Image (cartoon, grey):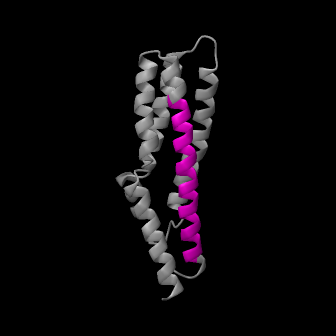
Amino acid sequence: MDIMVQLQRQLFDYTNSLFHEGFLDEQFNQLQQLQDESNPDFVVEVVTLFFEDAERLLNELTNTLSQENIDFKRLDAHVHQLKGSSSSIGAQRIHTVCISFRNSCEEQNVEGCLKSLQQVKQEYSTVKSKLETLFKMEKQILAAGGSVF
């Protein structure tokens, strides 16, 4: 089998597994549809901005939750932002955890918030490494002269 066909099949299977396992949703497909020859790095750029934003928000959440008197309104605002940005790139699992995180903020449930923060960090770390793998696979195909569009 041609190496290019093999690489493209691996990419296709890997991408499908991310959807199947619930890491990504339809929104990620929509992002990919906005990428074309004139803007080949669109998805990578959008996702990289998400990574930067998410890391900043995770630090804010960690700091806010480590205060003696927790500002739940502020905490909720950060979770809301993270929920929105994860939704915009189709990071479904992060989005889902943010929903229960916001419920804990509303109930001013410190334990629930701490648990949600750990879950969000875990989901973020997993989706980040999976997307980085996906982008590496795409780069390999492009470097070999293939197309991912």
Residue at the image point whose x is 41% and y is 55% from the top: 28
Q: Is residue 120 magenta?
A: yes
Where 8 falls versus 77 (above or below)? below
- Quarter of the picture holding the C terminus: bottom left
Residue at the image point whose x is 57% and y is 14% from the top: 70
Number of marks drawn: 0
Residue 114 in the image: x percent, y percent? Answer: 55, 25
Residue occupying the far top of the picture: 69
Main secondary structure found in the magenta portion: helix
Residue at the image point whose x is 56% and y is 33% from the top: 118
Horizontally, residue 28 falls left or right of residue 38, namely left
The foreground one among 7 and 49 is 7
Q: Which residues are magenta?
A: 116-142
Residue 83 in the image: x percent, y percent? Answer: 45, 36
The foreground one among 142 and 106 is 106
Where 71 falls versus 30 (above or below)? above
- The quadrant in which residue 29 appears is bottom left
Residue occupying the far left of the picture: 26
Residue 126 in the image: x percent, y percent? Answer: 55, 49
Whether residue 36 is visible: no
Residue at the image point whose x is 64% and y is 16% from the top: 67
Whether residue 39 is visible: yes
